[in-house]
Image: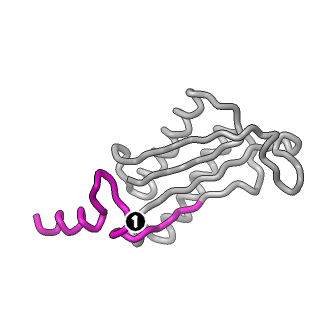
Amino acid sequence: MPIITVKVSATPSAALTARLADGIVGITAGVLRKKPEITAVTVDYTPPEHWIVGGRSLKDHGKASFWLDIKVVDGTNLKDEKARYLHDLFAFMETVLGPLHEESYALVHEVPADAYGYGGRTQEHRYIAASLS
């Protein structure tokens, strides 16, 4: 875990999806200390001519953009880690997508451990089970 949803202004490509997923998982593991083997990434595409900022399309701006939402358990990362994550993420996305419009976004969405999980068990349950071992 976590689950990461990213939307990019680009033409769909399996190679681009793989490059984005690999880079995002690497940054997530390196900065936020999340296990790559249980990190999921979905990538959605919007053509630049259909992504509008300030009344003009990204195609007209000559820029790319992205929106990334990552769900993590509340309290598992420090403020400085989240700030570094956003910095490193933006730098990576610009290397992959090209010049980014300033209106590109990322959200580290912190959720309660008792309301979030995978494989049919909450993260709270996993924490309690591990502490009893």
Q: Residue at x 28, y 68 (%)?
A: 124
Instruction: Identify residue for label 1.
Output: 73
In the rendered image, the vertical position of residue 63 relative to residue 82, given as above or below: above
Left-right relation of 62 to 64:
right
Q: Determine the residue located farthest toward the front in the rendered image.
A: 120
Residue 81 is situated, as x and y percent measured from the top left of the image, at: 48, 64
Residue 48 is situated, as x and y percent measured from the top left of the image, at: 78, 40
The residue stretch that appears in magenta: 107-133
Q: Nearer the viewer, residue 116 or 67?
A: 116
Please state, as top left, top right, bottom left or bottom right, where the C terminus lies in the image.
Answer: bottom left
Residue 42 in magenta stretch:
no
Q: Residue at x 56, y 56 (%)?
A: 69
Circle 1 Cα neighbour tier, 10 Å, few/some/many (<14 / 14–19 / ≥20)? many
- Mark 1 lies on a secondary structure that is strand
Q: Nearer the viewer, residue 65 or 115?
A: 115
Quarter location, residue 73? bottom left
Left-right relation of 17 to 67:
left
Residue 119 in magenta stretch:
yes
Q: Amino acid at mark 1?
A: Val
Left-right relation of 50 to 89:
right
Q: Residue at x 52, y 43 (%)?
A: 42
Q: Determine the residue located farthest toward the left in the rendered image.
A: 133
Residue 47 is situated, as x and y percent measured from the top left of the image, at: 74, 37
Specify how the rendered protein is coloured. one colour
Quarter location, residue 12? top right
Residue 63 is situated, as x and y percent measured from the top left of the image, at: 79, 44
